[in-house]
Image: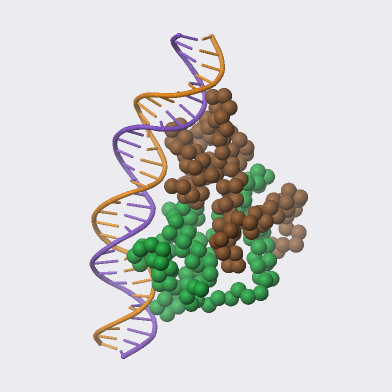
Chain colours: A green, B brown, C orange, D purple
DNA sequence: TTCTTTCATAAGTTGCTGCTTATGCATTGG
DNA sequence: CCAATGCATAAGCAGCAACTTATGAAAGAA
């Protein structure tokens, strides 16, 4: 299991990504976040995070005794690129990443323009 | 197995979608298309097509004794919508389809307008 | 130091998923 | 009519993927 789509194929992992969409979070917070929906063990979450990491969908950063996870835009862009290439017959699957990178970059810029978006960690609202 | 991402999680099914990106095709052509890459049986392909259909990623149309398959844009848009919503903290997962539709539509237009000269103002990547 | 917290890994089990062969059901053609 | 083509479904099986409990390593607190 290596690709982004294989990682995205699991519901629990998608839920993890949704939790991370609010910003960088330690593994423990993610465990509690998932447990709010359904009973799951800490090792199970750790294994899911490993899959997401190897798929390039999240990044990890050690801070003290905690591991801070965050979305990896490049991995998400790769997945989006593939979907965009599918819908567009003009773009073959040679190097869809370029075309998508443009698309994503534009979205980024548009989003940065809007004020107020900086989250440190902390509990979700 | 019901969602689009579950369906996209399989490599063979993604290959089927790539084959369909060139346009509507009968099941038999898809079988031969896959068999060009790796040995696979006709029933296996039929089962994969069933999954894609139930996930809303492809549509079927009977014509005589053939079944013509085609990409289902709505299903693909739904998957894209989710990915875009992820990268955009401002858009919760309430109705991400609207926001994404806009984004995707813009990309479509941009691509159709200038096939090849995409990076006029963008920085190199 | 020892205890606690935070997280990853090891090992083992179970259920689902994707594959196969065999078969059935339409549609077309002789 | 019967045969052939095109595709779906049935049944069964092997492999993997996700889960569990148990354990260990690293960093801070007492």
The total of numbered circles placed on residues is: 0
In this orientation, which residue lies closer to the viewer: B36 or A5?
A5
Picture residue at 42% right of the left edge, 80% below the top = A64
Q: Is residue A123 left or right of residue B92?
A: left
Residue A102, given in percent of the width and then of the height, sits at: 67, 59
Picture residue at 50% right of the left edge, 45% below the top = B55
For residue A51, which quarter of the picture?
bottom left
In this orientation, which residue lies closer to the viewer: A40 or A95?
A40
For residue B19, which quarter of the picture?
top right
Q: Is residue B123 above or below residue A91?
A: below
Q: Is residue A4 left or right of residue A118?
A: left
Determine the residue located farthest toward the front in the rendered image.
Answer: B94
Is residue A95 in view from this perspective?
A: no
Residue A117, given in percent of the width and then of the height, sits at: 60, 73
Residue A20, given in percent of the width and then of the height, sits at: 50, 67
Is residue A110 in view from this perspective?
A: yes
Picture residue at 61% right of the left edge, 35% below the top = B24
Picture residue at 58% right of the left edge, 67% below the top = B89
Q: Is residue B107 left or right of residue B12?
A: right
């Amino acid at each position: 299991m290596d690709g982004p789509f294989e990682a995205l194929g699991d519901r629990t992992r998608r839920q993890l990504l949704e939790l991370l969409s609010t910003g960088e979070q330690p593994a423990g917070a993610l465990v509690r976040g998932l447990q709010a929906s359904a009973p799951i063990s800490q090792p199970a979450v750790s294994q899911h995070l490993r899959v997401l990491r190897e798929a390039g969908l999240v990044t990890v950063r050690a801070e003290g005794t905690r591991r801070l996870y965050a979305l990896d835009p490049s991995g998400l862009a790769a997945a989006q690129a593939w979907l965009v290439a599918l819908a567009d017959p003009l773009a073959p699957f040679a190097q869809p990443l370029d075309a998508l990178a443009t698309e994503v970059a534009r979205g980024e810029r548009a989003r940065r323009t809007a004020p107020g978006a900086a989250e440190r960690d902390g509990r979700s609202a």
